[in-house]
Image (cartoon, grey):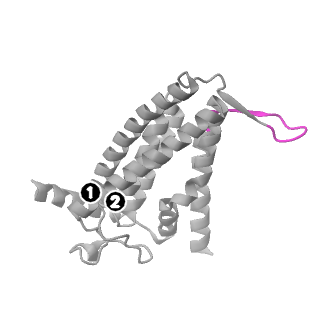
């Protein structure tokens, strides 16, 4: 059964990994980098503080840090050394010659489960409870996680199975830490997270009308803007 699932996983990986163009290589490499999403993280923190106040914002930020730490270490420290499944792009993997590799990037030795998938889905799950009444924000967070995961398959460093198991671990950790954080908020702040502020006002200066945007729209817009900038940089570098 395991061998059969492994073969299916390999075929699905090769199918999705084959969809590549030189113009998108740099885009996927940038998209996969964790630091390029800092603006979105800052925007999310600002929205949490705006809606719930600074003390709650700090608790939520610590919750995100704990979620990522647990998800990352569960994959990297507990499971990977035990399973020891080679990444597709690893030179010791028999299918490595069939893998589309970007700029010689092959990742580490082992890739099961995916830390990227675990981390991004952990954050998305955790924050989906914070923004549970904001559908667009929740959809944006999970779309961001899924997009990041696809970039790992595109780069040839993870099988879809690595992504799937990592995502499950991330969702579980996000839920567990949400429960812990929720208890901490009630114990420290004496009440659950409550929001009376649903919109922010952006002024464009004297003589310009103010723009009223919901918190969820700002989070979505930040993610879209980041992705657009990365795509523009990649296409500019390729064609110029």
Q: Measuring 11% from the left and 59% from the top, which residue is drawn there?
A: 3
- The C terminus: image quadrant: bottom right
Nearest the viewer among 91 and 208 is 91
Q: Determine if the magenta segment contains residue 41.
A: no
Q: Considering the numbered disc 2 on the image, is that residue within a helix, a strand or a loop?
A: helix
Residue marked by disc 2: 76
Residue sitting at the far right: 206
Q: Is residue 51 visible?
A: yes
Q: Which residues are magenta?
A: 203-217
Nearest the viewer among 216 and 27 is 216
- What number is the disc on residue 32? none
What crowding class fits label 2: few (fewer than 14 Cα within 10 Å), some (14-19), or many (20 or more)?
A: some
Residue 212 pos. (x, y %): 72, 31
Q: Considering the numbered disc 1 on the image, is that residue within a helix, a strand or a loop?
A: helix
Q: Is residue 133 visible?
A: no
Q: Is residue 89 left or right of residue 229?
A: left
Q: Measuring 44% from the left and 52% from the top, which residue is drawn there?
A: 147
Residue 181 pos. (x, y %): 47, 34
Distance CA(mark 1)–CA(mark 2): 6 Å
Residue sitting at the far left: 1
Residue 47 pos. (x, y %): 63, 37
Q: Is residue 12 left or right of residue 157?
A: left
Asked if residue 8 is positioned above or below residue 178 in the image, the reply reads: below
What crowding class fits label 1: few (fewer than 14 Cα within 10 Å), some (14-19), or many (20 or more)?
A: some
The image quarter containing residue 199 is top right
Residue marked by disc 1: 79
Residue 180 pos. (x, y %): 43, 34
Residue sitting at the far front: 188
- CB contact under 8 Å: marks 1 and 2: yes
Q: Is residue 30 left or right of residue 159?
A: right
What is the number of callouts on the image?
2
Asked if residue 130 is positioned above or below residue 7 in the image, the reply reads: above
């Amino acid at each position: 059964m395991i061998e059969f699932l492994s073969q299916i996983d390999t075929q699905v990986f090769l199918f999705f990994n084959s969809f590549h163009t030189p113009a998108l290589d740099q885009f996927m490499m940038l998209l996969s980098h964790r630091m390029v999403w800092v603006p979105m993280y800052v925007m999310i923190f600002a929205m949490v503080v705006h809606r719930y106040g600074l003390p709650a914002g700090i608790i939520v930020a610590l919750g995100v840090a704990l979620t990522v730490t647990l998800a990352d270490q569960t994959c990297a420290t507990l499971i990977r050394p035990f399973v020891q499944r080679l990444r597709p792009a690893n030179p010791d993997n028999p299918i490595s010659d069939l893998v589309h590799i970007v700029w010689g990037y092959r990742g580490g030795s082992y890739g099961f489960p995916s830390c990227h998938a675990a981390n991004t889905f952990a954050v998305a799950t955790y924050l989906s409870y914070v923004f549970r009444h904001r559908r667009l924000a929740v959809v944006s967070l999970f779309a961001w996680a899924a997009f990041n995961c696809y970039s790992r398959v595109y780069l040839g460093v993870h099988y879809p199975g690595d992504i799937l198991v990592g995502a499950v671990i991330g969702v579980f950790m996000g839920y567990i830490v949400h429960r812990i954080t929720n208890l901490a908020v009630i114990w420290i702040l004496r009440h659950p997270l409550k929001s009376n502020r649903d919109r922010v006002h952006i002024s464009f200066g004297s003589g310009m009308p103010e723009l009223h945007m919901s918190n969820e729209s700002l989070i979505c817009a930040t993610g879209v803007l980041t992705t657009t900038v990365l795509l523009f940089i990649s296409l500019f570098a390729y064609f110029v």
